[in-house]
Every structure is written in C-alpha cells, then in structure tokens.
Image (cartoon, grey):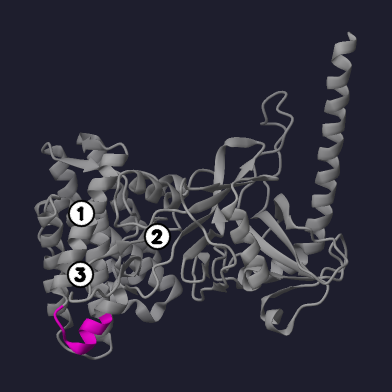
C-alpha cells in the first residue's frame, strides 16, 4: 500500500468512529425519551396514529440548535426526527444474497422541537413532556419548544441565516427581508401541523408528519411567486432535513411566509353572511376569479397533461373503489350506493366516448377555510382573496398530493365547502341556507369562467364525480372523528345520488 493512501484510510477510520459515537449517543438519547414520548405523542392533535399502538420509536436524526448539556439556567433546543412504528423483522430466507441489511422501516416520521431546561418556568408547565430518568438529559425538564418565545425566536434567527447545521438545511428567498427580534406566539387549534406567528410580519408553518420529497406547501407557492401570481403569499424562508441515506429527497420541515394580519377566512365570512342574511354572491364570484387565476398561474409554471381513454376511465374506477370501501365502513351510505355509482359510470362512459380532461398541479384541499380576505376602503368584504395552505389533504401520501389533477377537483372542494357552510347553518335551525348555497355555488362557477377558466359546469361528468368523491371522503372523516357532523355530508350524498350526470 502506498503512503499516499494512508491519510485517507486514517480519515475514514476517524469518520467511522465519529459515526459510531454519534449513533451510540443517539441511541442513549432515544432510550431516555422513549417512555415520555410514547405517552406524549398520542395526545398531540397532529399525531396521526390515534387509536393504534404507537409501536417502536426509531431515532432518525438529532440536532442541537442550542446546546442541551449546559449546566446553566438557560434553555437548550433539540430538533428530532423520530419514526413511530415497528421495523419489520428481516426475513433472511427471502432477502437477496449479500443484502446485508434489514427491511426498510415502516410507520410515520415526526418532527419534534424539544426545549431542555434544568428548571421549568411556571408559564411553560403546560408544555412539559417529562423529565428523563436516564441518559444525557437525565433530570432535566423536556418540553414543547414552540411555546417558549426564546426558543421560537432562535428558530426565526436560523431562518434568517441560510446554511447547514447537522442534517438541517436553511434557505431564504433572494431579496427577502426578515426582521429579527420579533415576538413569537403559537397558534392554537392546529390539526396536522403547528404554526408560530412572529410579530405581525411572518408566520412559520412546521410540518409535524414529514416524508421524503418537497412539500407542495413550499413547492407550489414558490412556483407561483416565480410566475408573478400575487394571490398566494410567497415563501420568505424554509428549512429541510437532508439525510445521508437519501440526499436527493430532502424532507420539508417548515415554511416561513408573510402573515396577513387582520384577514378573515372565507368560512368566517360565509357564516357571517348566513347569520346576517346578507348577499355573499359578489364574494363568491370574486373567489371564483381568484381560483381561476391561481390555476392559470400553476399551469404556466408547472407541467400539464391531458387524460384520455383508459387513463381518464381509471379516475372513475378509482372513485368506485373508494365508494365500495366507504360503504363497507359506513352503513349509512348503503342505500345510496347505486345512485352514487351512476355518476362515476357516467364519467367512465364519457372517457369511452372520447372525452378528455386537462390535468395540472392543484391546491388539493381547497375550501372556505383556505382563503383569506381583508377589508379594503370603499370595497365590500370578500372583494379580494388570497389562497393559502397548498399542502393538500394531509392524510394522503405525499406522492399522491403532488399528482396533477383536473382543475374541477379544486372547484368541487369549494362547492362542497359552500354546501357545508349552508348545511351547518341549517342544522342550527335557520332557514334559507339551501338557497344561499345554490346561489353562491353558481356565482363561484361564473366568476371562475369570467377569469378565463373553462366553466366548471361545462365539465358535468368530471364535476359530479369529484364532488361525489369529496362528499364520500367527508362521510368517512365525520363518521370516524365527528359523528355528530355526519348529517352534514349525508345531505349532499342524498342529493348527489339523485343527480342526473
């Protein structure tokens, strides 16, 4: 062996030794936290495995954003990626010769931000996760860091300065100014993620359940900003995890965007209209225009495609499969099964007759809660709309949420939202809700067409199929999570089962 190879061999040996030491430290850290996290995780709103055993916890990465081993009174900040779920046992008989590794892990990967203090101030006691009895954090208070304004502010400082720290990579949009020292407050009521508002300037959305690949809530707003679309807040900064075993598939962890202080979401405005019996159709028409503009910008910025023949028929077949699954899960759907199938059959027949559908990137979960409006002097409420939250339906796999689809899928989601608002109003005993829904559904479609988009009502087979598919999704969700709300989507199910495609 030549002398020139010796330094590389020594360096490789040192690197392997460091990797083994880090792995051992990570294992000790996870052992000390496992019991605490097993109790704490299922209680979080964003934990997806409710009602199931949490399974084995596997540490994917641990990064100190602020040292946690200090003996001083100040806090430490620990970033963890943890997989909740059992790793399948290796089947040596079926493994390829020379594979030399276990089967890939299963389960969900969660992002955790944990504060560490010797003593916890009274204001942070509700955020306590627990005190480890062993390991490197033994005896210290471990807590949800986002509730600590000091640690949330540190995260903002990291976003202000692009670069790498461990497996974490921080990026910032060129030319963006992010003020420092902004007070931080956590928003309550989050279901699948966590959000922190900094002053009245920015909001940071942290994705809790993460998967390899760019999240649409970063990808699509960046593309829209590049296309000059002002309907969507442009990302100011973001951060990702870049793991050694998958460097080309970073995990999107968080996105910092402008905070639209003083805005009202469409759901609140609709409920106000229903309660006060005011005309919402101008706002619905403007919302249709805004939706068409976002769709046009997405089609300009990202690839589109055309579905014909069997590919279009495949959409209908997939919907039929979801219907059959839902009927087995929710018995209330059984009387309407054949009526609902007729809408899907009409779409399959449309495909067989040479029908086609343009597909593109979409919002993916468009409803009245995903659009914001702010009062403008001399203009009625709802004149100008901003579209937010491009993550798609979080329960679906990330790859599915990034798939192109017909624009009427977003339209159907908004039409269902008008119907939801009206049905909720009707359930509370007020009259006129059904007329309100019909008028605003029509106004939304007219506004969409007025902005240059194809009139959704002209794509009757597609629109009926997607609205039915969305209503069935709602039935499943309400039956599992909010049984008292089940009558709301069931009203639509009865109407859609009788619809003439």
Q: Nearer the viewer, residue 325 or 116?
A: 116
Q: Residue at x 84, y 39 (%)?
A: 18
- Please rate how many residues cluster around mark 1, counting C-alpha atoms within 10 Å: few if below 14, some from 14 to 19, many from 20: many
**Please, is residue 48 above or below residue 218 in the view?**
below
- Range shown magenta: 271-279
| Front disc: 1 or 3 | 3
What residue would you read off at disc 2? 389
Q: Residues within 10 Å of mark 3 (few under 14, many from 20)?
A: some
Please tell me whether residue 253 belongs to the stretch shown in magenta.
no
| Residue 400 visible in the snapshot | yes
Helix or strand or loop: what does disc 3 sit on? loop
Q: Mark 2 to mark 1: distance in Å? A: 17 Å
Closer to the eye: label 3 or 2? 3
Whether residues under marks 3 and 2 lie with C-beta atoms below 8 angstroms apart, the answer is no
Question: Residue 76 lies in what quarter of the image?
Answer: bottom right
Instruction: Look at the image and tell me in which quarter the C terminus lies.
Output: bottom left
Q: Is residue 467 visible?
A: no
Give the mark nearest the N terminus, 2 or 1.
1
Residue occupied by mark 1: 292
Magenta highlight: main SS: helix
Tell me if residue 215 comes above or below residue 276 in the rendering: above
Q: Position of residue 430 (x, y in %)?
A: 21, 90
Which circle marks residue 383 in the picture?
Answer: 3
User: In what element is the residue under mark 2?
Assistant: loop
């Amino acid at each position: 062996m030549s002398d020139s190879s010796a330094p590389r061999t020594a360096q490789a040996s040192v690197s392997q030794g460091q990797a083994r030491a880090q792995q051992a430290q990570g294992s000790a850290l996870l052992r000390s936290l496992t019991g605490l996290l097993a109790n704490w995780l299922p209680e979080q709103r964003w934990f997806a495995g409710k009602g199931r055993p949490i399974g084995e916890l596997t540490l994917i990465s641990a990064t100190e954003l602020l040292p946690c081993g200090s003996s001083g009174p100040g806090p430490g900040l620990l970033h963890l990626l943890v997989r909740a779920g059992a790793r399948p046992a290796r089947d040596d008989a079926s493994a390829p010769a020379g594979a030399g590794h276990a089967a890939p892990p299963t389960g969900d990967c969660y992002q955790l931000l944990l504060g560490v203090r010797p003593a916890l101030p009274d204001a942070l006691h509700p955020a306590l996760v627990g005190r480890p009895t062993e390991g490197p954090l033994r005896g210290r208070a471990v807590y949800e860091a986002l509730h600590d304004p000091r640690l949330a502010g540190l995260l903002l400082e990291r976003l202000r300065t692009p670069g790498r720290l461990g497996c974490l990579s921080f990026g910032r949009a060129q030319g963006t100014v992010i003020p420092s020292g902004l007070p931080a407050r956590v928003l309550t009521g989050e279901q699948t993620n966590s959000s922190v508002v900094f002053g009245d300037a920015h909001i940071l959305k942290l994705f809790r359940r993460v998967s390899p690949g760019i999240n649409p809530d970063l990808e699509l707003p960046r593309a829209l900003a590049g296309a000059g679309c002002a309907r969507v807040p442009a990302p100011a900064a973001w951060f990702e995890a870049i793991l050694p075993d998958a460097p080309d598939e970073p995990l999107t962890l968080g996105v910092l965007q402008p905070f639209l202080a003083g805005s009202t979401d469409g759901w609140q405005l609709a409920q106000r209209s229903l309660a006060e019996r005011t005309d919402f159709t101008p706002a619905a028409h403007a919302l249709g225009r805004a939706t068409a503009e976002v769709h046009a910008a997405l089609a300009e910025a990202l690839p589109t495609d055309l579905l014909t023949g069997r590919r279009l028929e495949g959409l209908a077949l997939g919907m039929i499969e979801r219907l059959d699954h839902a009927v087995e899960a929710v018995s209330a759907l059984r009387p309407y099964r054949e009526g609902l199938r007729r809408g899907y059959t009409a779409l399959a027949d449309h495909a067989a007759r040479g029908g086609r559908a343009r597909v593109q990137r979409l919002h993916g979960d468009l409803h009245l809660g995903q659009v914001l409006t702010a009062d403008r002097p001399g203009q009625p409420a709802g004149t100008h709309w901003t579209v937010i939250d491009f993550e798609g339906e979080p329960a679906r796999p990330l790859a599915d949420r990034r798939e192109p689809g017909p624009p009427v899928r977003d339209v159907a989601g908004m039409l269902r939202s008008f119907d939801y608002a009206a049905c909720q109003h009707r359930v509370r005993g007020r009259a006129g809700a059904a007329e309100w829904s019909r008028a605003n559904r029509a106004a939304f479609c007219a506004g969409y067409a007025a902005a240059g988009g194809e009139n959704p009502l002209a794509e009757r087979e597609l629109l009926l199929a997607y609205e039915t598919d969305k209503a069935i999704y709602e039935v499943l969700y309400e039956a599992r999570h909010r049984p008292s709300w089940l009558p709301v989507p069931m009203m639509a199910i009865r109407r859609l089962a009788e619809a003439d495609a």
